[in-house]
Amino acid sequence: NAGVTQTPKFQVLKTGQSMTLQCAQDMNHEYMSWYRQDPGMGLRLIHYSVGAGITDQGEVPNGYNVSRSTTEDFPLRLLSAAPSQTSVYFCASSYSLAYEQYFGPGTRLTVT
Amino acid sequence: DAKTTQPTSMDCAEGRAANLPCNHSTISGNEYVYWYRQIHSQGPQYIIHGLKNNETNEMASLIITEDRKSSTLILPHATLRDTAVYYCIVSGNQGGKLIFGQGTELSVKP
């Protein structure tokens, strides 16, 4: 199993550009989520999904969109990048709600 | 979800037990206590979780007080590779959402 994979590892965007951060898991997990981590801070939940076709907002959803068309993939879209979205983004998945979550290696995004 | 309070940082000598405390005085009956750690720049790693009873696995032990208002994560023989930020999280079943606080930065020293 590859576990949770994220692409790209690094990305630099200009203000106003859009992009999609990819997340995939091969463990047949129903639950997937996106977090961001700013320097010196803990992780903050952006969006999560409890299964294909179902998504919901976390703590800091503004400026981000998600969709879940398959069990395996959970992409995160930045609609119009802003410098405040400079962060490290982590994707996670788990078997179900109360089980341990497996995190990907992260995407380091810089918006100039 | 209930909030947690952890010390900002702790030191531990290599080979000794590391005891990391966490207060969660507003925990409700259906909420679990989870522990994760994050080694520099990597994605967080699950360690252990529990509801009421003490739990042990190959990585650590989790001791939850009888009133469930606090818990302690124990790394029985800390190594330099255990240097990390440790997060104590309380979460219920409703969404499996993990709300991370600041965590405890554990430094294991030779």
Image: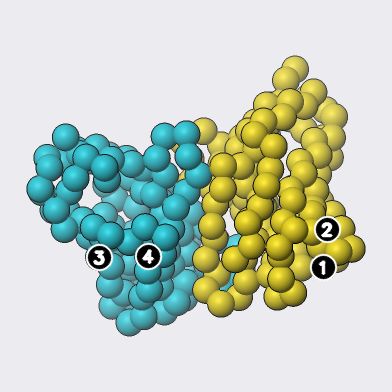
Chain colours: A cyan, B yellow
Q: Which mark is residue A65?
A: 3
Identify residue type, mark 4: His
Query: Which residue appears at 60% of the width and 75% of the height?
Result: B93
Q: Position of residue B12 (x, y in %)?
A: 77, 27
Q: Is residue A69 visible?
A: yes
Vertical placement of residue A6 versus B76, above or below: below
Tag 3–tag 4 contact (CB < 8 Å): no
Q: Are marks 2 and 4 in contact (CB under 8 Å)?
A: no
What amino acid does circle 1 point to?
Answer: Lys
**Residue for badge 1:** B52
3D distance between C-alphas at marks 3 and 1: 37 Å
Q: Is residue A65 left or right of residue B13?
A: left
Q: CA distance from mark 4 to mark 1?
A: 29 Å
Is label 1 in a helix, a strand or a loop?
A: loop
Q: Amino acid at mark 2?
A: Ile
Q: Which residue is mark 2?
A: B64
Q: Secondary structure at mark 4?
A: strand
The residue to which callout 4 is attached is A47
The answer to whether marks 4 and 1 sit on the same chain is no
Q: Are marks 1 and 2 in contact (CB under 8 Å)?
A: yes
| Residue A34 seen in the figure | no
Crowd band around label 3 with a 10 angstrom C-alpha radius: few (<14), some (14–19), many (20+): some
- Specify the subunit that label 4 lies on: A
Few, some or many C-alpha atoms within 10 Å of disc 2 (few <14, some 14-19, many ≥20)? Answer: many
Q: Residue furthest right?
A: B66
Whole-number angstrom distance, CA of label 3 to CA of label 4: 8 Å
Image spot of residue A72 (x, y percent): 37, 70
Which of pointers 1 and 2 lies earlier in the amino acid sequence? Answer: 1
Q: Quadrant of residue B1?
A: bottom right
Residue B101 vs A91, above or below: the answer is above
